[in-house]
């Protein structure tokens, strides 16, 4: 089951010292269906990304590796996109006096 999740990209990388990452989700909803990390979803008239963080943090949505949107001090983030591309999430938290990478998601492919 674990190998299948890795192979499908249904996973993320986390650094749990700043706080537990249990409960993190990154998903997409479109007219023709839903998807999560590693999935491909049809654009249609738009896709809504839903990000749920286990704790308040700085969340960044990247489109093809470039910053698209930043939310600060949030634990729920949503955005509607209207362009096909590769989207992923990076989350940062303060720990030991510095901003540190906390969560790095696998992408969702919008076609």
Image: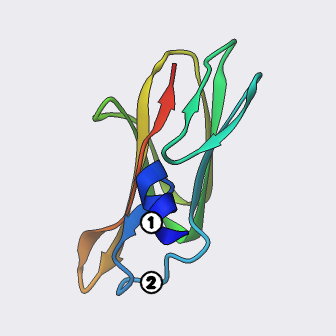
Crowding around mark 1 (Cα neighbors within 10 Å: few <14, some 14 to 19, many 20+) is few
Q: Quadrant of the N terminus?
A: bottom right
**Residue 44 position in % (x across, y down):** 67, 13
Residue 96, given in percent of the width and then of the height, sits at: 25, 86
Please give the name of the residue rendered at 69% of the width and 12% of the height, measured from the top-left corner.
Answer: 45
Q: Is residue 11 visible?
A: no
The answer to whether mark 2 and mark 1 are in CB contact below 8 A is no
Q: Which residue is mark 2?
A: 19
Q: Quadrant of residue 105?
A: bottom left
Query: Could you give the CA–CA distance between mark 2 and mark 1, rounded to whole angstroms?
Result: 25 Å
The residue located at (62%, 21%) in the rendering is 42
Q: Which mark is residue 11?
A: none
The numbered mark, 2 or 1, whose residue comes first in the sequence reads 1
Q: Residue 28's quadrant in the figure?
A: top right
Q: Nearer the viewer, mark 2 or mark 1?
A: 1
Q: Nearer the viewer, residue 54 or 30?
A: 30
Secondary structure under badge 2? loop
Mark 1: secondary structure: helix
Position of 8 with respect to 64 (left or right) is right
Q: Residues within 10 Å of mark 2 (few under 14, many from 20)?
A: some
105 to the left or right of 111: left
Q: Is 53 drawn above or below residue 90 in the view shown? A: below
The residue singled out by tag 1 in the image is 3
In the rendered view, would you say 91 is above or below 70? below
Name the colour scheme: rainbow
- Residue 40 makes an appearance in the image: yes
Q: Residue at x 65, y 19 (%)?
A: 46
């Amino acid at each position: 089951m674990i190998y299948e999740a890795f192979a499908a990209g249904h996973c993320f990388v986390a650094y749990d010292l700043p706080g537990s990452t249990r409960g993190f989700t990154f998903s997409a909803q479109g007219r023709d269906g839903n998807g999560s990390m590693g999935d491909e979803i049809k654009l249609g008239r738009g896709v809504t990304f839903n990000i749920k963080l286990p704790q308040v943090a700085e969340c960044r949505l990247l489109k093809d590796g470039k910053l698209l949107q930043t939310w600060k001090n949030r634990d729920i983030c949503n955005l509607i996109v209207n362009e096909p591309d590769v989207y992923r999430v990076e989350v940062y938290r303060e720990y030991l006096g510095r901003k540190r990478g906390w969560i790095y998601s696998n992408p969702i492919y919008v076609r």
